[in-house]
């Protein structure tokens, strides 16, 4: 079929009301109408849908559109019917949401030739009755939307997508157009090979979204930062992505109690509730939708002004897809992501039960994400390079790294030192252990392996273990080092690493930096801890007050014969120096301060703060006092009652269908709120007496904080994380609560 440019433009105006095409839309449509295969790489908001909708209306027969989400199908069908009034069956969808009568209506429209576009899920496409139906009708072409789902290297791989080619052959051949907003060269190759369309013409639009601002922040005080960010973007629509359904529910509730209209969206909700919440977001009845990736491909809202990632995504493709929901109208779009290396470790642990090949793919995708999060380079340059596109500008002027360049150092000598250290060892060790050797840390595991006698021990003592961890992570990102899949966390040197050691070259590494939100607004400076009298110093809080609070804590700790951190942690005191609490309820808004600690230790601190505020005429920052979500879950009562009955913790976890470490998280929340429980019955069963004594003694006499990571580093490999967490709970209940 041939068609002129004039006729295309006339139909574009007739059906969709547009005067002109965007980018390569016209070339794509012409190529498809002429009976050719097309591979379309086009970023979110680039107009992919039009590339198959207009040809479907112009070509004889019915176009089969394979789409992964029911919500997306419904939206697209409604949109087409809105463009072309008077013909209800012009576009239909076929999926599990339809009842028998609705399915029959769709079949009648297909047989009669009314339907020009049929949206179908890949699962529905494989059903025998649907294949038999589609064999009876002329097919104009097949459109495979969200085609990255075909590739195991894509961010949303779906096995059922791998069967599409086989079904196409069975129904009857016709041109194929594949469309995706995210595809690396590897994913593109996989898609083309799987669909036997290596001859397809590739239409690749730039992945650059110049209107989007990219920023990565350290995952500390995250809830307060989110509230502050949303309040500073008041009246604007936004999406917050979380990895777990539980976190989605928690954050949505948290936003609402802090006066922000928000609703959750995840696959665990029933379809009606999901649809209702999505519609409220689209109709601007709420400002924020909190979602898992289930929301990613089902939303078409051009004026989303910000996308926040509460958790770092599993892949850069997922990140690009999700951030691409912002600013689809070409106007402002802020993409804020919170990053913690602990989140990466969690994601790595999730992979452990999967097949080795899947672990390998997941690990590689995760490394790319880590590289992006920790890079000192222009984020736009790194992101576009990942998708095989060169960004030639050195400074994009619209990402955190370009606006706030990091200090750099040449780390070639440090990297060579790390590689040589690993090479000198008979067996492999985790990154933390390697860093501790180089930093000259002394702990039991180092001594047990006699690594304190190594020539490398303390060679980088002046830099500290955190510095060496950063170098090791850079080595992992650059594929000079790698983690063993089978033996989780053990570091080895790659062939590229040995090549680098033999032929070292400049290796620019960024100094560690904490991402701090800055603002030139004086009022905002007051709101985050400034004083009327100018008493505040650096670090976001009132340094004079902070020093006074630390002295009070020291005196109280000495009086009570307790470690200082047991009374209040440093982050708790820092929050006090920012929020200036003068009541028990306000004190409980500070990080790490539950009911128990607030009542037990808070009085003297509140008196000090109240007096300080009065004497210095300080304007207290009421606008950022964050209300916390009360722990009113059914789990809390069940857990406490079960512990009172001395039910083993693993049995409690099993009864509530929880991971054991998730249960420990819940118990820690309960204990930190001031509730005193007795876990001796379980601890004595799973932890030997000497180990209990050693860990308890560490927290009582040596620990500078309640950090599990610090405890692991100090106590070494002879103690498991589970043991340390259990004994820490015992210590807090007996000593702190």
Image (cartoon, rainbow, N blue to C red):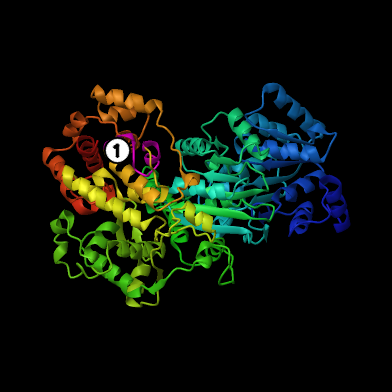
Q: Position of residue 427 (x, y in %)?
A: 22, 59
Indicate whether residue 596 is drawn in magenta.
yes
The image quadrant of residue 117 is: top right
Give the answer, above or below, for where 401 lies relative to 155: below
The total number of labels drawn is 1
Indicate whether residue 498 is drawn in magenta.
no
Q: State which region is magenta.
A: 584-600
Seen from the viewer's position, the closer of residues 523 and 461 is 523
Query: Residue lying furthest front in this view?
Result: 615
For the point 54% across and 43% down, the residue is 293
Whether residue 602 is visible, yes or no, is yes
Seen from the viewer's position, the closer of residues 29 and 505 is 505
Q: Which residue is mark 1?
A: 597
Quarter containing the C terminus: top left
Category of crowding for the residue at label 1, using alpha-carbon neighbours closer than 10 angstroms: few (below 14), some (14–19), many (at least 20): many
Seen from the viewer's position, the closer of residues 586 and 231 is 586
For the point 12% across and 38% down, the residue is 689
For the point 75% across and 34% down, the residue is 136
For the point 62% across and 41% down, the residue is 298
């Amino acid at each position: 079929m041939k068609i002129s440019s004039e006729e295309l433009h006339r139909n574009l105006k007739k059906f969709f009301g547009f005067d002109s095409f965007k980018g390569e839309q016209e070339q794509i449509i012409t190529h498809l109408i002429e009976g050719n295969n097309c591979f379309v790489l086009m970023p979110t908001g680039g107009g992919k849908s039009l590339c198959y909708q207009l040809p479907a209306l112009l070509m004889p027969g019915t176009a089969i559109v394979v789409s992964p989400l029911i919500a997306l199908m419904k939206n697209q069908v409604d949109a087409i019917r809105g463009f072309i009034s008077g013909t209800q069956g012009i576009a239909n969808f076929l999926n599990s949401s339809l009842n028998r009568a609705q399915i029959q209506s769709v079949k009648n429209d297909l047989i009669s030739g009314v339907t020009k576009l049929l949206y179908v899920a890949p699962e529905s496409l494989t059903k025998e009755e649907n294949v038999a139906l589609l064999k009876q009708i002329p097919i104009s072409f097949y459109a495979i939307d969200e085609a990255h789902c075909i590739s195991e290297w894509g961010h949303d791989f779906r096995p059922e997508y791998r069967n599409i080619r086989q079904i196409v052959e069975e129904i009857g051949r016709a041109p194929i157009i594949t469309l995706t907003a995210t595809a690396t060269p590897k994913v593109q190759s996989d898609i083309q090979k799987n669909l036997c369309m290596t001859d397809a013409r590739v239409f690749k639009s730039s992945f650059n979204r110049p209107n989007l601002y990219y920023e990565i922040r350290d995952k500390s005080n995250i809830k307060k930062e989110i509230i502050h960010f949303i309040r500073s973007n008041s009246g604007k629509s936004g999406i917050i992505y979380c990895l777990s359904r539980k976190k989605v529910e928690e954050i949505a509730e948290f936003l609402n109690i802090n006066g922000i209209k928000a609703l959750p969206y995840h696959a665990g909700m029933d379809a009606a509730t999901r649809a209702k919440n999505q519609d409220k977001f689209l109709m601007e009845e709420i400002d924020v939708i909190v979602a898992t990736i289930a929301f990613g491909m089902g939303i078409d809202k051009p004026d989303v002004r910000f996308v926040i990632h509460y958790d770092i995504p599993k892949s850069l493709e997922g990140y690009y897809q999700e951030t691409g929901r912002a600013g689809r109208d070409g106007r402002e779009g802020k993409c804020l992501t919170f990053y913690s290396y602990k989140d990466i470790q969690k994601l790595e642990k999730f992979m452990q039960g999967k097949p080795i090949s899947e672990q390998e793919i997941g690990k590689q995708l995760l490394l790319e994400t880590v590289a992006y999060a920790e890079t000192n380079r222009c984020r736009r340059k790194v992101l576009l390079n990942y998708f095989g596109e060169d960004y030639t500008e050195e400074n994009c002027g619209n990402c955190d790294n370009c606006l706030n360049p990091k200090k750099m150092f040449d780390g070639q000598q440090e990297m060579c030192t790390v590689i040589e250290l690993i090479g000198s060892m008979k067996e492999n060790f985790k990154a933390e252990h390697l860093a501790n050797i180089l930093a000259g840390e002394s702990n039991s595991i180092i001594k047990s392996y006699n690594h304190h006698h190594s020539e490398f021990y303390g060679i980088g003592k002046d830099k500290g273990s955190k510095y060496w961890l950063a170098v090791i992570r850079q080595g992992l990102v650059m594929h000079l080092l790698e983690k063993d899949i089978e033996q989780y966390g053990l570091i080895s040197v790659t062939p590229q690493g040995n090549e680098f050691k033999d032929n070292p070259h400049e290796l620019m590494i960024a100094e560690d930096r904490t991402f701090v939100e800055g603002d030139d607004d004086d009022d905002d400076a007051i709101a985050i801890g400034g004083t009327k009298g100018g008493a505040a110093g650096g670090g976001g809080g009132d340094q004079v007050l902070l020093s006074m609070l630390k002295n009070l804590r020291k005196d109280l700790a000495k009086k009570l014969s307790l470690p200082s951190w047991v009374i209040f942690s440093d982050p708790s005191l820092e929050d006090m120096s920012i929020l200036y609490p003068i009541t028990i309820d306000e004190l409980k808004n500070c990080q790490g301060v539950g009911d128990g600690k607030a009542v037990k230790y808070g009085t003297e601190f509140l008196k000090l703060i109240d007096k300080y505020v009065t004497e210095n005429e300080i304007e207290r920052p009421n606008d950022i006092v964050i209300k916390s979500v009360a722990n009113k879950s059914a789990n809390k009562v069940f857990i406490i009652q079960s512990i009172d009955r001395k039910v083993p913790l693993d049995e409690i976890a099993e009864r509530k269908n929880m991971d054991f470490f998730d249960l420990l998280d819940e118990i820690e929340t309960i204990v930190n709120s001031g509730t005193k429980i007795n876990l001796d019955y379980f601890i004595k069963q799973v932890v030997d007496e000497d180990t209990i004594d050693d860990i308890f003694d560490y927290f009582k006499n040596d620990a500078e904080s309640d950090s599990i990571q610090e405890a692991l580093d100090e106590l070494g490999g002879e103690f498991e994380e589970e043991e340390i967490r259990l004994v820490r709970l015992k210590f807090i209940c007996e000593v702190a609560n």
